[in-house]
Amino acid sequence: MTSETPAFPDDFLWGTATAAYQVEGAAAEDGRTPSIWDTFSHTPGRVLGGDTGDTACDHYHRFREDVALMAELGVDAYRFSVSWSRVQPTGRGPAVQRGLDFYRALVDELLAHGITPYLTLYHWDLPQELESPFHGGTAAGGGWPERETAYRFAEYAQAVGEALGDRVHHWTTLNEPWCSAFLGYGSGVHAPGRTEPVAALRAAHHLNLAHGLGVQALRSVLPKRAEVLVSLNPAVVRPRSQSAEDVDAARRIDALANRVFAGPMLHGRYDEDLLADVRHLTDWSFIKDGDVETAHQPLDGLGINYYTPSVVSAAPEGATEVDRADGHGNGTASPWVGAERVAFHQPPGEHTAMGWSVDPTGLGDLLHRYSEEAPGLPLYITENGAAYDDKPDAEGRFHDPERIAYLHSHLDAVARARSQGIDVRGYFLWSLLDNFEWGYGYSRRFGIVHVDFETQQRTPKASARWYAEVARTGRLPEPTAPALD
């Protein structure tokens, strides 16, 4: 650690993170039915290389091996998500005990190794039956653009809370609802692959409603000591210049990326400029009396997911195409509904295999912003990490100095924020394992543990050893690769 970097306190939480569809596999076992990501990934042309999550990392069968890896690394916590269609195959009705049994076994294994479970209820894998336009011959479903989905989520939250609340004390309602709404229903680069601007806005609102209803459902069945969070992926939006047009472009993206969720969840309102920006698309009549109050539930913490900032400008006059290379794929439609004339720009400097610029100042900016916007609310980094094209050496070892440097610089930003009085209590590295990276299939590797997807062999990378030292000491070693056996 450099002399300038503050140390982390002994009670700082060090964790790793995964998501159900990205790691579990066992897509049709023990009663699980397809989610929207099963359908999407099996649709030709949707996922790079035709990859699917049918097997993924086979975490469903190998979770004990993976928990042992976490224990070896000395991490304090594991953030995982539950597959909704594994628990409720139709997205409604009684929970399937076989599905819940997997999560009971996973949690028990974590606790036996002294690892605290952090459970996320929804990481993008909506049961397909809730997305399909018809169920049982009657009009139903329709996914997140439909209000009914929010009520189904609350029932699901209550079922999982009742089953696991005796042993899981840290709960997250939604992970990155922006991606669910605007990549799933706006640009179509994520499941379910729809390109309907108004549906994206409706989905955003119903995700806010689902969050609030889900918090209420969890509070009704969990012990009082349980903590409930939400994980957002707020954007760091920087105007390319200080011209009025570029500043307004940044304002528009900030409204669609950040305030559309933080407004209702943290403040019980939608900002007027957001509503006005898309008034030509919708009259917002799907917002019912009491909805924003329901979305605005007391929380025990706020999860922040951060990877890279965005630089934007107003599109040049007369431009026929607008660059949407904003780190979220470049589909035929824009995820930025009502702001399609905003251009995104690639910052200079180092980039990851995702094409994302490496800039830890963005993480510091977010921590400062949300400590001011939600004073008194503890903050957690619930995702942060980087994909690189990791290759083995002659002995089959994986040296990943770029990832170590990325982690070092971003953890340094967290340490500095803490030293300035910001209440950051934990850090979850994305990801424990190389896994199914959504529309990129298996072509992008975020893991600190390499996975051979043919053999399922796990091999810790140099970054895993480096992170283990951070978790052990609460200090940042120099960003150099440790020796590998």
Image (cartoon, rainbow, N blue to C red):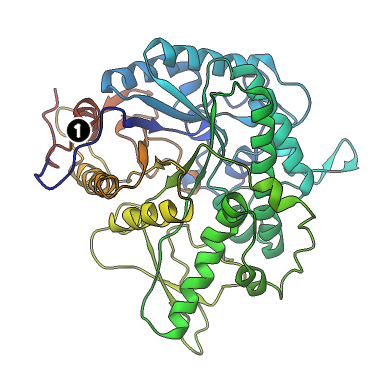
Q: Quadrant of the N terminus?
A: top left
Tell me the residue that label 1 is attached to: 466
Determine whether the residue tagged by mark 1 lies in a helix, strand or loop.
helix
Horizontal and vertical percent position of residue 214: 66, 36
Residue 207 visible from this viewpoint: no
Residue 275 versus residue 33 in the image, above or below: below
Left or right, residue 460 beside residue 29: left
Horizontal and vertical percent position of residue 110: 42, 16
**Residue at left offset 65%, top offset 61%:** 195
Horizontal and vertical percent position of residue 28: 63, 24
Mark 1, other Cα within 10 Å: few <14 / some 14–19 / many ≥20 = many
131 or 304: nearer the viewer? 304
| Amino acid under disc 1 | Trp
Q: Quadrant of the C terminus?
A: top left
Residue 112 versus residue 222 in the image, above or below: above
Horizontal and vertical percent position of residue 461: 24, 31
135 or 209: nearer the viewer? 209
Left or right, residue 207 beside residue 255: right
Residue 484 versus residue 350 in the image, above or below: above
In the image, farthest residue toward the bottom: 318
